[in-house]
Each structure stands twice: as C-alpha cells, then as structure tokens.
Image: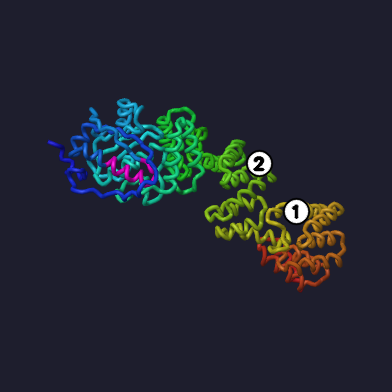
C-alpha cells in the first residue's frame, strides 16, 4: 500500500486529476540543440507517486517544450532508471552527493534525481530542488504535478549557472509557483551563453570566469542579491580551481558572521563589530560592503589610527563608485591634521553622495569640519541640522562670504577662509606690512568678495587711518549688508568719533547676527550709556 501523503497536504499525481500546461511553444525555425537527461527515481518517490514512469517522462517533456520555445533546446530523456536510494527527509545536499557517486554523467548532459516529497507544503525552491552549479547533476523533490516541470526548469537553469532573479513572473525567483512559465530576459541571455560555451567544450574554470564577468556587468537589480553573491562565490572558486561546494559553505559561514557584525553595530558596539568583521576582509569575494563597513567602524573607534586610513583606502579602491569610504577617509585624515588630503577625499565623496538624503547629516558635519561652507549649508538644509546651518551663516557673515554667483566655487572656500584667518592674524599681531601683502593677494584672488574689504578696513584702523578705514568698511557693508565684521569695525569707528548712537546700532546688528560676541555686548552697553 502506498503511503498516504495526501494527508500531509502534499498534492501528488495520485491526489489530483489534472495538470496546468506550460505555454505552447512556437514552431522551431532550426534544429534544436539536444540536452540529454537521464532520470533516476528513488524508492521514496516511487512509493509516493502513482505511475512514476509516466510522471517523470511527462514532466521532462513539458519542461522541454518550454526550453524549445525559449532557447531552441530540447531536453531529451534518454532513460528512466530505478534508484536504490531511500533518503526520506535527508538534506538535498546528501541526496545530490549520492547521485553524483552513482552516476558520473559522462554520457549525459544531466543526471536528474527524483527523491521524496516533504510532509508539509513549501514554496521555497531551496527546499524543493538542488543543482550542482556548472555541473551535471540535480535532484528534485516530489511536488504537485503542476509544479514539477517548473521546478525542473528552475534547477536546470542553476546547473547552467543562473542565480535567482527578481522578476516576479520568472521561473527563477526564489519562490516556487506553477503560474511562472517564463525565464526573464537577462536569464535567457545568460543561459544561451552558458549553452553555447558548453557546445564549444569550454573548460569549466573558463566558463565560470565568463559567466561571472557577464553577471557582474549586468544591469544592477536584475538578480536577487544574496543568490547572486553566492553564485559569484562559487564561480570564483571554480575559476581558481577550488572546491565550489566548500566555497558555498564558507559563504554561508561568512553570511552568519556578517549578520553578527550587523547585530553588534546596531547594538552600539563598534569595536566588537570590527573584531568580528576582520576575518571577512581577506576573502576572495567579500561579503558586500564588508570593507566599507570596516572603514566606518574603524573611523568610529579610532578615526586618527593608521589602520582606519588603510581600511578606508582599501574600501575606496574596492568600490570606486561608493562615496562612503571617501567620506570616512576625509574624517580620518582631518583627525590626523592632513587637511589637504581630507578635503580632496571629501570633494569626491560629496560628488558621489550629495543626492543621498540619508547621508546628508554626515556630509554636513564633515563639510563643517573641513571649511566647506556652501556644501555644509546645503547638506544641513536636507538633514535639518540647525547647528551646522548656524555655523555656515556665521562663517558667511564674519568672513564676508555671501552666497551667489560672485562667491568662490564651493571647493575653494576652505582656501579662502584659511587665507582670511592668516591675514587677520597678521593684522591682530601688528605684522602690518605682511598683512598688507596678504590682503592684496586675497583681493586679487577674490575680487568680488566683501571679506577682503573688511580686512583692509581693519588694517587702516591699526594704522590710525580712520578716513580710509571708514571708506573700506562702508564699501564692505554696502556690498554685503549682513557682514558682521564690517558692522563691528564701523561701530568701533563711530565710537572713536563720538557717534555713540550710530555705534550702538552697529553693535546691535552684530549681536543680532551672532549673540555670542561678548565684546560687542559690552561695547553696546557702553555706547548706550554715553548717548
């Protein structure tokens, strides 16, 4: 008596009366490429499926109709063999290994094993079938008759090197469904390439390299990310003459470790996360973003450490289109005082990340630390960072750096600010001749900016050339009414000339723009008392 698998909800041929047909193939225009299949049917499958000979032949024929229509490939069943194997609920990997030892498939393109069904329903392909990537073996579990041909096609595509794709209607999604009867266009192109190279007797390592290059060059988002990653891991192992199965097992271990890294990172334990991540950094094919994450974690733990720079440089080299390592490099090199290199890395990172809303807060803070006023201001607006926005506004007002077409390019702002501070320092220290040269050079480099006029005003004041000082300050204030430097100096000039009411107005404007200037507050009190 056959086992009562219908009681477990498994719909087999003996439990239903009809199958859903695959789409009718188009008439062939040229002789089909023959892909030979030898079927092995184990004891469990034979116990569970009525008329298993007919069932297996029917499913291969139905799958062949689809491959003939899509790729002009005929799946030719050369024999159906009884297989003295009983695995019941053993892992599919074990059944696949047993089949490989039973049949080397030297005279067939595919040795296909049919094994026991599951006692519960599932639509996860990984539980229903398993294929040896770029090999000659696959195993299928007993499933609903309407699903078996689609399951066969799914594993056949894996044999030829195709990973899961993201097309909801595709035969190669990670979830099984009898309604899916087509391969996605990207998958068809990959299968055609694999078949052509098999026909040409291309060696397996060469085939692996070719298909890996095709997958890496494909349109982003066409493939399911984790499945693509696992396939590429095995391709790289095959190309290097290594054991692809060991590489796949290592990939699973790495994925588990990376999940632990993610957990530690989310728990606010960056040092522990970095230690857990280190073993993944030397893999031939790393877990996605591992190097970038290592750069980020190291930058959080020790931004000025040499290791942070090394990790971030490696991450930037591995992912030239990713701006995050460059952003971390900018922070790391700023922490060590290497501002030139830090700014160069930030400029490139900003180019790559400026449109990314999630990165706006980080861009704003790093831009501020490096003196990029316009970029800090724009990122702060996107991130709603009031602190950085206030910093940018103060920088503009104190340094005579208004926004607009007359302003320097955003990448040149740090150089302007540094030269401004240097000239102002020379004025304050009484190095007036040196300050005069520096201010003249700044005026020539940035002729449209009011900032150098404010410095010239301060220089004249130091030389007790009050009339020239007032002219320069008035010009600066007229060009940029929000210039706090110009109003502060005009307040000093009015105070010296006894114009206490006007002096008070200027100091009031300074405090409106920057309430933290205690000297302006003290002078305002004095001027009000003198009125």
Instruction: Name which of mark 1 and mark 2 comes first in the sequence.
Output: 2
- Foreground residue among 222 and 25: 25
Query: Which residue is at 33% across, 28% downward?
Result: 100
Its colouring scheme is rainbow
Picture coordinates of residue 130, whole percent (x, y): 33, 36
- Foreground residue among 398 and 332: 332
Query: Which residue is at 67% across, 44% downward?
Result: 341
Picture coordinates of residue 124, whole percent (x, y): 32, 44
Q: CA distance from mark 1 to mark 2?
A: 21 Å
> What is the secondary structure assignment of the residue under circle 1?
helix
Residue 482 position (above or below residue 1):
below
How crowded pointer 1 is (Cα within 10 Å; few <14, some 14-19, many 20+) is rated as few
Quarter location, residue 244: top left
Query: Which residue is at 21% across, 49% downward?
Result: 18
Picture coordinates of residue 55, whole percent (x, y): 23, 40
Query: Which residue is at 79% across, 66% downward?
Result: 473
Quarter location, residue 135: top left
Q: Which residue is mark 1?
A: 421
Characterize the magenta stretch by its predominant secondary structure.
helix
Range of magenta residues: 59-73
- Foreground residue among 531 and 68: 68
Residue that sits furthest to the front in the current view: 30
Q: Quadrant of the C terminus?
A: bottom right
The reply to whether discs 1 and 2 touch (Cβ–Cβ < 8 Å) is no
**Res. 237 visible in picture:** no
Q: Is residue 334 left or right of residue 131?
A: right
Q: Is residue 146 left or right of residue 476?
A: left
Is 299 part of what is drawn in magenta?
no
Residue that sits furthest to the left in the current view: 1
Q: Which residue is mark 2?
A: 336
> What is the secondary structure assignment of the residue under circle 2?
loop
Q: Is residue 375 left or right of residue 472?
A: left
């Amino acid at each position: 008596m056959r086992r009562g698998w219908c009681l477990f909800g498994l719909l087999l041929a003996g439990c239903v009366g009809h199958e859903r047909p695959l789409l009718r193939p188009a008439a062939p225009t040229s002789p089909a490429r023959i892909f030979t299949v030898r079927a092995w049917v184990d004891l469990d499958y034979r116990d569970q499926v009525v008329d298993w000979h007919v069932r297996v032949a029917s499913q291969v024929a139905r799958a062949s109709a689809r491959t003939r229509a899509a790729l002009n490939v005929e799946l030719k069943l050369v024999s159906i063999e009884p297989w003295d194997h009983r695995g019941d609920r053993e892992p599919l990997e074990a059944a696949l290994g047993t089949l490989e030892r039973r049949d080397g498939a030297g005279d067939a393109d595919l040795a296909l094993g049919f094994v026991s069904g599951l006692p519960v329903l599932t639509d996860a392909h990984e539980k229903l079938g398993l294929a040896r990537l770029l090999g000659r073996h696959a195993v299928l579990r007993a499933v609903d008759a309407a699903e078996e041909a689609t399951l066969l096609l799914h594993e056949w595509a894996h044999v030829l090197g195709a990973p899961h794709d993201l097309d909801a209607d595709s035969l190669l999604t990670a979830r099984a469904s009898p309604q899916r009867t087509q391969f996605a266009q990207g998958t068809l192109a990959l299968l055609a390439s694999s078949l052509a190279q098999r026909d040409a007797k291309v060696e397996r390592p060469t085939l692996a390299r070719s298909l890996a290059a095709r997958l890496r060059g494909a349109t982003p988002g066409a493939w399911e990310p984790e499945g693509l990653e696992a396939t590429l891991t095995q391709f790289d192992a095959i190309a290097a003459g290594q054991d692809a199965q060991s590489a796949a097992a290592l990939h699973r271990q790495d994925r588990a470790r990376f999940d632990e890294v993610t957990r530690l990172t989310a728990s606010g334990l960056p040092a522990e996360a970095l230690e857990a991540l280190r073993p993944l950094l030397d893999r031939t094919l790393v877990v996605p973003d591992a190097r970038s994450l290592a750069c980020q974690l190291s930058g959080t733990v020790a931004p000025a450490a040499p290791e942070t720079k090394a990790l971030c440089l490696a991450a930037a080299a591995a992912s030239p289109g990713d701006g995050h390592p460059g952003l971390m490099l900018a922070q790391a090199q700023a922490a060590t005082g290497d501002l030139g290199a830090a700014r160069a890395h930030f400029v490139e990172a900003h180019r790559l990340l400026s449109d990314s809303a999630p990165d706006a807060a980080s861009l704003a803070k790093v831009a501020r630390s490096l003196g990029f006023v316009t970029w800090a201001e724009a990122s702060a607006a996107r991130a709603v960072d009031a602190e950085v926005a206030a910093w940018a506004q103060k920088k503009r007002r104190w340094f005579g750096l208004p926004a607009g077409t007359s302003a320097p390019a955003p990448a040149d702002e740090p150089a302007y600010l540094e030269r401004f501070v240097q000239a102002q320092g020379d004025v304050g220290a009484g190095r007036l001749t040196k300050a005069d040269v520096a201010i003249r050079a700044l005026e020539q480099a940035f002729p449209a900016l009011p900032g150098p006029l404010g410095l010239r005003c301060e220089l004249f004041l130091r030389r007790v050339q009050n009339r020239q000082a007032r002219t320069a300050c008035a010009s600066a204030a007229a060009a940029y009414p929000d210039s706090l430097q110009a109003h502060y100096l005009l307040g000093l000039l009015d105070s010296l000339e006894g114009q206490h009411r006007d002096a008070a107005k200027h100091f009031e404007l300074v405090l409106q723009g920057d309430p933290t200037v205690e000297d302006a507050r003290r002078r305002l009190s004095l001027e009000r008392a003198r009125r």
